[in-house]
Image (cartoon, rainbow, N blue to C red):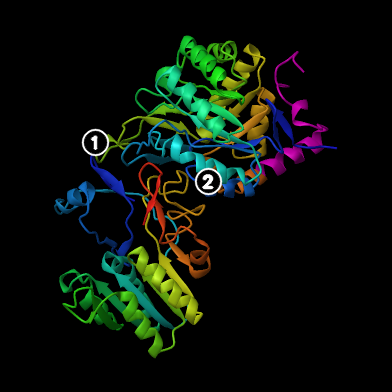
Amino acid sequence: MVWVPGIDEFPMSLSYSGDAFGITYQIIGEGTKALASKKVGDKVGIRGPYGKGFAIHGRRLLLVAGGAGMAPLAPLAEDAVAHKCSVDFVIGARTARELLFETRTAESGARIHISTDDGSKGFKGLATDLARTVVSKAQFECLYACGPERMVVGLLSIATEKGLPMQASLERIMKCGIGVCDSCAVDGKHVCRDGPVFKEVELRKFAELGKTKLDLCGRKTPV
Amino acid sequence: MTHLSVDICGLKLKNPTMLASGVFDETGKSMLEVAKAGAGAIVTKSIGKEPRPGHPNPSIVELESGLLNAMGLPNPGIGAYASEIKEAKLGGVPIVGSVFGGTEEEIADLAHAMAEAGADAVELNLSCPHAKGYGTEIGSTPERVESICRQSKKRASVPIFAKLTPNTSSIADLALAAERGGADAVVAINTLKGMAISPEAKMPILANKVGGLSGPAIRPVGVRCVYEIYEAVKIPIVGVGGVSSGRDALEYIMAGARGVQIGTALWTEGSEVFNKVCREILGFMEENGYETIMDMVGVAHSGRH
């Protein structure tokens, strides 16, 4: 959890790990706007880490990132290549301008497949559709996903068809971050503590996946 | 035959542990998980009339001996919450619906609606220390506690539990007022009002500045409160505050509580804590020759065995 004093506190995953840690964020509200105005030497509060992240499973991996979902997958790709895994990486974004970490990931040694909604670069269409093509051309041992929930749902059905293990990171409103307040509940599990990364067996049990999420008041709203 | 079951105002609990309000209980499915994990009863999130987002983050501070929270009573409103109660009831344990409001009438309306939604009892939140106009702000004088309990009792068809604040000079007076007002049981204690400051940020960490302290740090306060209340009232008492082991629960029971609520321990131990506490209580009872929970309630009061 990242605290911008006086403004807000919100969950972030690490986009850089190793000797130095880093986060990557999209400006979507007051908190991230305030974070963007910070200067070198300014301080923010950190608590954590919490929950369960991605784990390397097998040697031939397919990673699929949608938009800002790239943040936690970039370090996974680097880690996997360092562990001698073969990595195919589908990077999706709305436009070429919004593609994240393309160079960084290519330099890590992963095979890059680009998709943009508007076709300004690479495959024109959804990352899910490009991933389906990639899956049909090679054998994989695990599928990793982070991005819009409809993408996760689409990839889950591909994984199910192919009998492929999968790990996906989910996003919900998080308040406490430590598994007590229930604000990030999905079918009785807590994204902050039991997740945010869930395996295919857990994902398949979630009746709410791709359908409903809780708002700040705890009301079920459409995803 | 030694057993853990206990009757609290007609609610039949298979064991004296209950999920405390505010933890794991915004959704029916989470409450169902707690029921499966072995809780004897479940208290819901505190529910108001309208949807409420609660306070902005930070809303929680982790401390060495507990949690400081200022969630600010987030809830979907009683209308939307009825379906969560329905789902929670599939767990087969009594559901206690917690409600909060700003006036006698509002609280009584909610108590009625909770009973209609299927709650087996209603817990009146007269004690949240971090929401303006609610909780402690209306529940810290005996007069208000009595009138709120009286009006809620009139409207609700199920037992009424009054959850009291320790942030007062005499919690026993509040308990007496609740009893006079017709409450069927009292629940003690809610969190203690507190604050944490970040020296680097030079400001309180919680967005709401003040919050409620829970967890092991407040157990001696809770046990003392239950002990005092037991000497003052005849209605059943439910103890809450810092219970994470069988011995912790036994302190409350011997002080006078028939049941204990568990909340913050789910942070440190997960929902397995309910089974653990039960196992430890049972082990103690077998070793010390107690057959029922009631055999131990209040035994710490000399002359009141």
Q: Which residues are magenta?
A: B276-305
SS assignment at label 1: loop
Of residue B280 and residue B295, the one placed in the foreground of this image is B295
Rendering coords of residue B114 (x, y %): 53, 31
- Compared with residue A10, is residue B70 higher up or lower down, i.e. above or below? above
- Compared with residue B279, is residue A204 higher up or lower down, i.e. above or below? below
Question: What label does residue B202 carry, if any?
Answer: 1
Characterize the local packing of mark 2: few (<14), some (14-19) or many (20 or more) Cα atoms within 10 angstroms. many
Rendering coords of residue B189 (x, y %): 53, 26
Q: CA distance from mark 2 to mark 1?
A: 40 Å
Question: What label does residue B26 carry, if any?
Answer: none
Whether residue A68 can be seen here:
yes
Which is nearer the N-term, disc 2 or disc 1?
Answer: 2
**Three-letter amino acid code of the residue under disc 1:** Lys
What is the number of callouts on the image? 2
SS assignment at label 2: helix
Left or right: residue B168 versus residue B288 is: left
Residue position for label 2: B28
Rendering coords of residue A146 (x, y %): 35, 67
Snapshot quadrant of residue B289: top right
- Compared with residue A96, is residue A182 higher up or lower down, i.e. above or below? above
Snapshot quadrant of residue B59: top left
